[in-house]
Image (cartoon, rainbow, N blue to C red):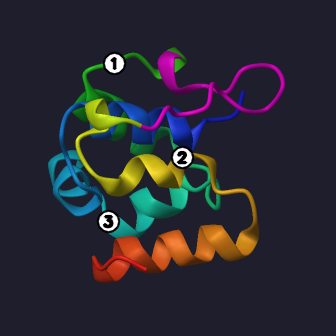
Amino acid sequence: MKTDGRLIRRKRIGLGHGVNSFAAIAGISGAALSRIENGLRAPRPETLKKITMALGCQIDEVIAESGGAGPACEAGPSAGNDEEAACEAASPVEQSALRYKEEIGTAL
């Protein structure tokens, strides 16, 4: 089983939280949450439990489908902020740019 960071991001955005505010609620660092959401790091079981408890969901709701990736995030006003664009970063360059945007909080 592999955690799908896009599902975590979708749920977090649906709750109306930014990376750092949600990370504080979950008791982890914003950088760690960003790496998990971008698929650069697999969370330890205790970290995953913190995230899912803060999201109010079960662990199986953030597990990747058998193909290795969960459903794509959908852009739109329901996401509540500009992070919906981060859901489907196609290239490593785009992923790096999105991480930079999250870290400094400015539009690219």
Nearer to us: label 2 or label 1: 2
**With 74 as the anchor, is 38 left or right in this view?**
right
- Name the residue furthest right: 67
Residue at 65%, 27% in the rendered image: 70
Three-letter amino acid code of the residue under disc 3: Gly
Judged from the image, the secondary structure of the residue bearing numbered disc 1 is loop
Q: 36 above or below 70?
A: below
Q: Is residue 82 magenta?
A: no
- Tell me which label, 2 or 1, sits earlier in the chain: 1
Residue at 54%, 43% in the rendered image: 5
**Region of the chain picked out in magenta, as a range:** 61-75
Question: Residue 57 bears which disc, if any?
Answer: 1
- Tell me which label, 1 or 3, sits earlier in the chain: 3
- Quadrant of residue 19 in the image? bottom left
Location of residue 94 in the rendering, given as x and y in whole percent from the top left corner = 64, 70
Three-letter amino acid code of the residue under disc 1: Cys
Judged from the image, the secondary structure of the residue bearing numbered disc 2 is helix
Q: Is residue 62 magenta?
A: yes
Location of residue 6 in the rendering, given as x and y in whole percent from the top left corner = 54, 40
Q: Residues within 10 Å of mark 3 (few under 14, many from 20)?
A: some
* Mark 2 vs mark 1, CA separation in Å: 19 Å
In the rendered image, which residue does mark 2 sit on? 87
Q: Residues within 10 Å of mark 2 (few under 14, many from 20)?
A: many
Is 21 in front, or is 97?
Answer: 97
Question: Residue 30 bears which disc, if any?
Answer: 3
